[in-house]
Image (tube, rainbow, N blue to C red):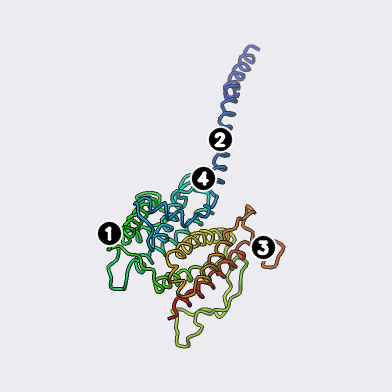
Amino acid sequence: MEFWNSLKEKFRNVVAVFKPSEDGATLRKIIFSLLGIILIFILVVGMYWSREPAQFSIAQNTAEKLAVSGNQYVVGAATTAAMIRVSETLLQKPGGYLTNDVMPPGMYLDNIPNWEFGALVQVRDLSRAFRESFSRSQSQSTEDPDLIISEPQFHFDNDSWLFPPTEVEYNEAVASLYSYLGRIADPANANAQFFARADNLSDWLLNVESRLGSLSQRLSASVGQERVNTDMAGETGAAQSTPTQAEMSIRTPWLQIDDVFYEARGASWALLHFLLAVRTDFEAVLEDKNAMASLDQIIRELEASQRTVFFPVILNGSGFGIFANHSLTMANYISRANAAIIDLRNLLEQG
């Protein structure tokens, strides 16, 4: 009998060891509460970081950037200052530059990183136009030393988070643009120039036209399309490397629909500010070509593309279905802006 009582007592002692105490239960509650608070904080911060930057005033921005060097407005200052401000927005908006984030909440956000890429492509294209056209009087003239630095820096890997981080390279590009802006606005410096000519503007718009055409096609493919292959249309002697079908079925993967949408939003946001700045710097050229109305129409279409998206999810309803299709709506504005750019280029190229 004593043996069995002793065995029961030992069993109770073993169970007591594994039985959670009140202190242990309290500790677990504290840990789970802290994890819950951290999770809610990450979600709230992620929502705040996912807000798209607002439009800024070109005139005010130009004055602020010129105040850094203490100079007055000169031709080219508005466009240079706009490119600086758009670049700084990529780096200094809430959350900073998110594309290369490896920690939450940045690592799980995808809307703003795609927005960043769309704006970055426009910055890269404009920086190339600055280096190759806007700062040079002719093809045999010398490239500007600041733009030689900024243009390749903007083309650095957009998602590098270490050795070196992307932000370091882009900040160096912005610093070079500040130097260029100060030099062209300095009355005593004749070595740095910005040439507002119709041919320069037309060359850059040709690249913009190509970018918008691609975005429009990708946005329209959200619902799937059967397209006739027009790659070789218009030239009987043309050739291509590999044969393709006469008709192609094109559809954006479901998980990439919102990515393309926000890339288009970022591109149109940056381009809107660049064209508003061009309206100031190229005013005499546009008036001479009677092209101001065409530029204003492009700006109006891009402004419409920046309207607030009230629904939290990018919908993908069919073209004539009961649900909205945000991609097709964006494609409409992008296509109309692209058509207006074609008209503007035709006006600029007229003698």
Number of the front mark, 2 or 1: 1
Looking at the picture, tell me which residue is in the foreground, 256 or 111: 111
User: Disc 4 residue type?
Assistant: Pro
Describe the element under mark 2 as helix, strand or loop: helix
Q: Which numbered disc flags the more N-terminal residue, 4 or 1?
A: 4
Number of the front mark, 3 or 1: 1
Q: Which residue is mark 1?
A: 188
Looking at the picture, tell me which residue is in the foreground, 324 or 256: 324
**Residue occupying the point 58% across, 39% down:** 40
- Would you say 92 lies left or right of 134 here? right
User: Disc 3 residue type?
Assistant: Gly
Q: Which residue is mark 4?
A: 105
**Residue 123's x, y, as percent?**
43, 60
Q: Which residue is mark 3?
A: 317
Q: Which numbered disc flags the more N-terminal residue, 3 or 2?
A: 2
Does 168 appear above or below 205?
above
Q: Is residue 105 visible?
A: yes
| Location of residue 157 (image quadrant) | bottom left
Q: Residues within 10 Å of mark 3 (few under 14, many from 20)?
A: some
Between the C-alphas of marks 3 and 2, the distance is 38 Å
Describe the element under mark 1 as helix, strand or loop: loop
Between the C-alphas of marks 4 and 1, the distance is 49 Å
User: Disc 1 residue type?
Assistant: Ala
Describe the element under mark 4 as helix, strand or loop: loop
Between the C-alphas of marks 3 and 1, the distance is 59 Å
Image quadrant in which the N terminus is located: top right
Between the C-alphas of marks 4 and 3, the distance is 29 Å
**Residue occupying the point 54% across, 58% down:** 262
**Residue 221's x, y, as percent?**
58, 68
Does 211 appear above or below 188?
below
Describe the element under mark 3 as helix, strand or loop: loop
Q: Which numbered disc flags the more N-terminal residue, 4 or 2?
A: 2
